[in-house]
Amino acid sequence: MKNIFEHTRSSWVKYSEYDFVQDEDSGQVYIMPASDAKPQFFNPLENAEQMVIDALNVGLTCMSEESTDEDKETGVFSFVSEYGLLGLMTALPTTPQFMDYDAVYLTKNQYIKAETMSTEDYLNIFFPFEMPDIIKNKNGTMWSIEGDRDMMALAMTMDSRPMAVNMEFQREYAERYDWLVKQFKDWAFIFFTTTMYYDNLDNDNKDLYRQAMACFDGIAPTYHIELLDKPTLVWDFHSLLLGIQMMFSFILVNGQNPLRICKHCGTIFKASRPSAVFCSPQCKNRYNVYKSRSKHKG
Ligand SMILES: [Zn+2]
């Protein structure tokens, strides 16, 4: 399996600029596109491995007791700036088509305890500042995007995707910062779980690790094949979150180039061979210099 994402494609939207925005009433902090930012499409599968590694390193920063609040904010913010928001709004419900219904049914998740809530209340969570203009008529639910050329162009291109996914690509869509932190931490935790499961001979905790893995799921994305210059597998992710989760799963089960934590700098990297322990020759050198120095001291 040399590159499982070769001849695969998917699309997601990221904006040219994002902001941290605080809701003064609730005190809640969100990340959302800056008011004059431009949307742009990209294929998240093009650098799938790098994206997973970036996500895991952000998670590592968020988990670490040595990280300051600023380190965590910088980590999450730079990930969003590079790849867009995670699409939590369509990752949590049982169907991304929830706009067709009056109520949303939620899969078991760590953000919202309720099993169901009204579609309107649910939308409020992700549109805390400005709600898109939603019109319900005999043709179904629509939302008004008159006047904004960028938004109209986006909505037309994304016509085949569920309406809620389109809404996530709008400028008013926001994700809670603390939820993002939680999600990144979760991925890093899963990574640690697998690493420890195989690296440690600690049999007592193996059940715990197995249980942790069992919680790592989500609605599987669907796919179809498009006849481009070559037959191409097109993944229909309804959220970047599920996309990352799927790619992460593939990397975890692909034993040839496992992900490792660098023995010197502590970042997660893709090992060029299974025995590699440093992320770069520089880290290897620095580690050896450091070791010989401490030897002289001792
Ligand atoms: Zn390193």
Image (cartoon, rainbow, N blue to C red):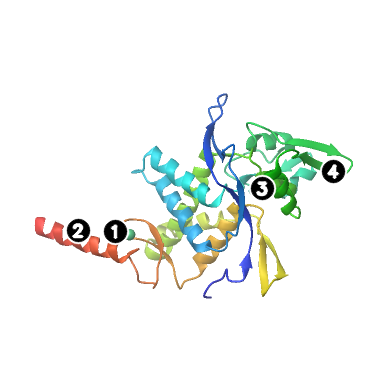
- Between discs 4 and 3, the one toward the N terminus: 3
Q: Quadrant of residue 289?
A: bottom left
At horizontal 36% and vertical 39% (from top left) the residue drawn is 68
Any part of residue 298 in sight: no
- Residue type marked 2: Tyr
Closer-to-camera residue (255/281): 281
- Between discs 3 and 1, the one toward the N terminus: 3
Q: Is the C-beta separation of discs 3 and 1 under 8 Å?
A: no
Q: Which mark is residue 264?
A: 1
- Gap in angstroms between the C-alphas marked 2 and 3: 48 Å
At horizontal 71% and vertical 69% (from top left) the residue drawn is 225
- Gap in angstroms between the C-alphas marked 4 and 3: 19 Å
Q: Is the C-beta separation of discs 2 and 1 under 8 Å?
A: yes
Q: What is the x, y in percent for residue 183?
A: 52, 47
- Residue type marked 4: Gly
Q: Secondary structure at mark 2?
A: helix
Q: Which mark is residue 140?
A: 4
Q: Dot 4: within a 10 Å radius of its alpha carbon, few (fewer than 14), some, or many (20 or more) residues?
A: few
Instruction: Read off the residue under disc 2.
Output: 290
- Residue type marked 1: His
In the displayed structure, 175 sits above or below 241; it is above
Closer-to-camera residue (171/191): 171
Q: Ligand 1 within 8 A of label 1's CB? A: yes
Q: Dot 2: within a 10 Å radius of its alpha carbon, few (fewer than 14), some, or many (20 or more) residues?
A: few
